Amino acid sequence: MTRIAFLGPPGTFTEEALLTQPDLAGGELAPMRSVPDALTAVDTGEADLALVPIENSIEGSVNVTLDTLTFELDLLVQREVALAVELNLLTPPGVGLADVRRVMSIPHATAQCRSFLARELPGVELVASNSTAEAAQEVGTTRPPDTAAIGTRLAAKLYGLEVLAPDIVDHSDNETRFVLVARDGVPAPTGHDKTSIVCFQHTDRPGSLHTILGQFSARNINLTKLESRPTRRGLGDYCFVIDLEGHVADEVVADCLRDLHAQLADVKFLGSYPAAGERGAVIRREADQAWKAADTWIASLRRQVRS
């Protein structure tokens, strides 16, 4: 049975995202304490796959995931999963809003609820945890009379808590993107794919980013993400994390990556994989049908070639 590591404990949004994938939900699920622990489990062979959060529509990138994949481990993204996020204020039974003096959760979650906390719980102490579920587990186990957790309804059910205030996020369109990673292997192109790379410059000089972006512009390749990250080699030394539409098996994408690799100090390939999105499956079906029609057309032309 495939063993899949994920950011635990049970009841996290990562687990909810994992359970939306039928082929993953039937595997052996292994909750890990942190994102690096989940990724390292794949690197060491303790797990076959890992699902981890990488980006939120409100708070942006999950830096610990980006940095671990960029600088510490050599893993490849197999797919992405997008999940609409609902954050709730969870308390032990009998604890009211006026009783709450401390709120526990992962910092990404508390940051998404700033307005609610400022309005309803001004001056509340924020306590960081490794995940929303770990916060719920702590509150559900110790049952302090003055502490709440920010987490999922699933976590409330698992740890015996009540949803004191539902859906407390500041913005209604709150979505988190997760990536499934493995030690090796690139999924076959589907017609609706994304490729992730990290570009390292030789030196920080004027026009260096323009040179990189020019490779994509010249080939009409759309970028869905561009972010700079410090390389850890010195102040002001940055690399660029880039997500682009297309697959390394596409000739135009391969040609672009070839030129970048030739010009830059290094290019790290993080993977080519099926893109998420509500219309993803439809786009992939249409692309598959279009490819089959084009293949039939080419075959008909080739049959006309004289021997």
Image (cartoon, rainbow, N blue to C red):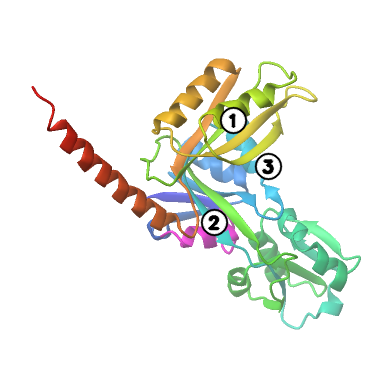
User: How far is the residue under mark 3 from the one under mark 2?
Assistant: 17 Å
Label located before the other in sequence (3 or 2) = 3
The reply to whether the magenta stretch includes residue 15 is yes
The C terminus sits in image quarter: top left
User: Who is closer to the viewer here, 167 or 105?
Assistant: 167
Q: Position of residue 292 (x, y in %)?
A: 26, 45
Q: Which residue is mark 1?
A: 198
Tag 1's secondary structure?
A: strand
Is the residue under label 2 in contact with that under label 3 (CB below 8 Å)? no
Q: Residue at x 90, y 68 (%)?
A: 122
User: Who is closer to the viewer here, 186 or 145?
Assistant: 186
User: How far is the residue under mark 2 from the one under mark 1?
Assistant: 22 Å
Nearer the camera: disc 3 or disc 2: 2
Q: Position of residue 65 (x, y in %)?
A: 62, 42
Residue 20 visible at all: yes
Q: Residue at x 69, y 75 (%)?
A: 166
User: Who is closer to the viewer here, 49 or 283?
Assistant: 283
Q: In the image, which disc is placed on residue 30?
A: none
User: Who is closer to the viewer here, 307 or 108?
Assistant: 307
Nearer the camera: disc 3 or disc 1: 1
Q: Which residue is mark 3?
A: 63
Q: Position of residue 265 (x, y in %)?
A: 61, 17
Q: In the image, which disc is placed on residue 82?
A: 2
Amino acid of disc 3: Asn
Badge 2 density bin: few <14, some 14–19, many ≥20, Cα 10 Å: some
Q: Position of residue 238 (x, y in %)?
A: 71, 27
* Magenta part of the chain: 7-21
Q: Residue at x 12, y 33 (%)?
A: 303
